Image: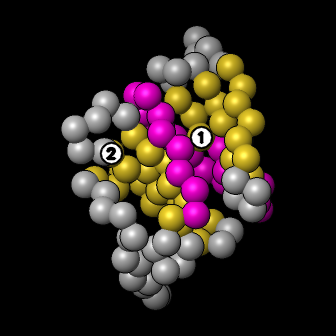
Amino acid sequence: LIKSTTKVTLEKRAPKVIAFCPVLNGYLYTATVIGEPYEKLVHIDHSGKVLWEKSYPDSVDTFGMFSEREAIAMSVTAGQIDVIDLLEHTVRSYPHQYA
């Protein structure tokens, strides 16, 4: 059962938030972009201010925490896995083909 809730107002309007989770220094979410064939992975602080974002040409199939300060995002269509440092906002990309 959820014992508490938190309200977050996003700095930038997102037409459809696909996934949302708490992470170090705020939240991480994926969202669609109106009129564009891509999705964004966005790191925001607790007040909703955008700290970092990256566009993906098709979609982010899944994302989650890799370690306390690193998130991992996977795109099957791009054949890519990204490891994002949530403090430095750097991305390490690795090619990956799914069987």
**Amino acid type, residue under disc 1 in the picture:** Ala
On whether residue 9 falls in the magenta region, the answer is no
Position of 69 with respect to 10 (left or right) is right
Quadrant hosting residue 43: bottom right
Give the numbered dot on residue 35: none
Q: Is residue 14 visible?
A: yes
The numbered dot on residue 73 is 1
Q: Residue furthest left?
A: 35
Residue at image coords 72%, 26%: 94
Q: Earlier in the sequence, mark 1 or mark 2?
A: 2
62 or 87, which is in the foreground? Answer: 87
Report which residue position mark 2 lands on: 32
Location of the N terminus by quadrant is bottom left
Badge 2 local density, few (<14 within 10 Å), some, or many (20+)? some
Vertical order, 27 against 18 (above or below): below
Pick the front one: 4 or 6 = 6
In the rendered structure, which segment of residues is drawn in magenta? 51-72
Judge whether residue 70 can be spotted in this image.
no
Residue at 74% across, 52% down: 85
Residue drawn at point x = 44 percent, y = 45 percent: 40
- Across and down, in percent, residue 57 comes to 43, 28
The residue nearer to you, when weighing 64 against 11, is: 11
Q: Looking at the picture, how far across and down is residue 62, in whole percent?
A: 51, 41
